[in-house]
Image (spheres, helix red, strand yellow):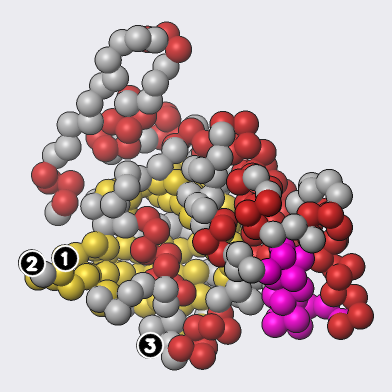
Amino acid sequence: MNTATTATASQAGESPLLEIDNLRIAFATPQGRTQAVRGVRLRMGRERLAVVGESGSGKSITFLALLGLLPDSATVSADRMRFDGQDLLGLGAHAQRALRGRRIGIVVQDPRQGFDPQMSIGQQLAEMLRLHGKAPRQGVHRRVRELLADMHIREPGRVADLYPHQVSGGMAQRAMLAMMLSAEPDLLIADEATSALDAVARHHMLALIDEQVRLRGMGLILISHDLDLVAGHADRVIVMYAGRVLEELPAAGMALAATHPYTRGLMACRPALQRLGAALPVLDRDPAWLH
């Protein structure tokens, strides 16, 4: 099928925030070059886009390529890769650092990977504010408490004095979200940001991300393997398999709109209360999906 996505109503009359045409990513391995992303195309505005698929489908590396965060073994090519009109192809290291955080924020699965264990949460938030000039020198500590309070963290002053290892996974994820939002980016990428949390915390975290994205008028990319979880917090859903976009769906009514066998297979494999104890269906993959 044609992987080119169409503009949504939310994009009508405005320039795309993100444009990707024919993105290809390959990695050098001892066995030769391995193609990991194959011709991905998408357009998005300041909307909520979910990208779903199994592990290894190319979800994360597609968007890490935007930020120049792939290893040296990766080769990235595209006909077009633009963010808010800025050409990302061949962007220098200094320009990439300016883009990361300031214009595009990313929240990953394990928030402790993004924190310095030797600095308190408040110190790291303050450092981010100073780096991006988002608070006057005298008002940095007040702004740190405000950001933590925005994440519905009780006693933000006390939490600001704690170190990353002293807070729960859910609290660390909220603090990481506060740090990413402190730079007031235009686009937030949540890369499996809830998969390390329990079921209740996942929904609370996604509701918080949704709230902040709406309040700030940002674009959001939710990367996940959980169709049900992200569908309630997205406007559109893109389904990826083996480095390709197989299908694009409206999040509302996704189950009825899905036509590709892979998407329908993923939905059929979900556990259901009405068949407790029964063997789960197995996804039957067709080699033709790779072409």
Within-10-Å neighbours for mark 3: few <14, some 14–19, many 20+: few
Q: Amino acid at mark 2?
A: Gln
CA distance for labels 2 and 3: 27 Å
- For the point 29% across and 19% down, which residue is it? 280
Task: Decide which of tag 2 and tag 3 comes sooner along the chain.
Answer: 2
* Local SS, label 2: loop
- Cα–Cα span, label 1 and label 2: 8 Å
Instruction: Answer whether labels 1 and 2 touch (C-beta < 8 Å).
Output: yes
- Which is in the foreground here, disc 1 or disc 3? 1
The residue drawn where x is 17% and y is 31% is: 284
Q: Is residue 262 left or right of residue 83?
A: left
Q: Amino acid at mark 1?
A: Thr
Residue behind mark 3? 90
Vertical order, 29 against 273 (above or below): below
Direction from residue 45 to residue 127 in the image, left or right:
right
Residue 93 magenta-highlighted: no
Q: Which residue is mark 1?
A: 34
Is residue 152 found left or right of 273 in the rendered image? right
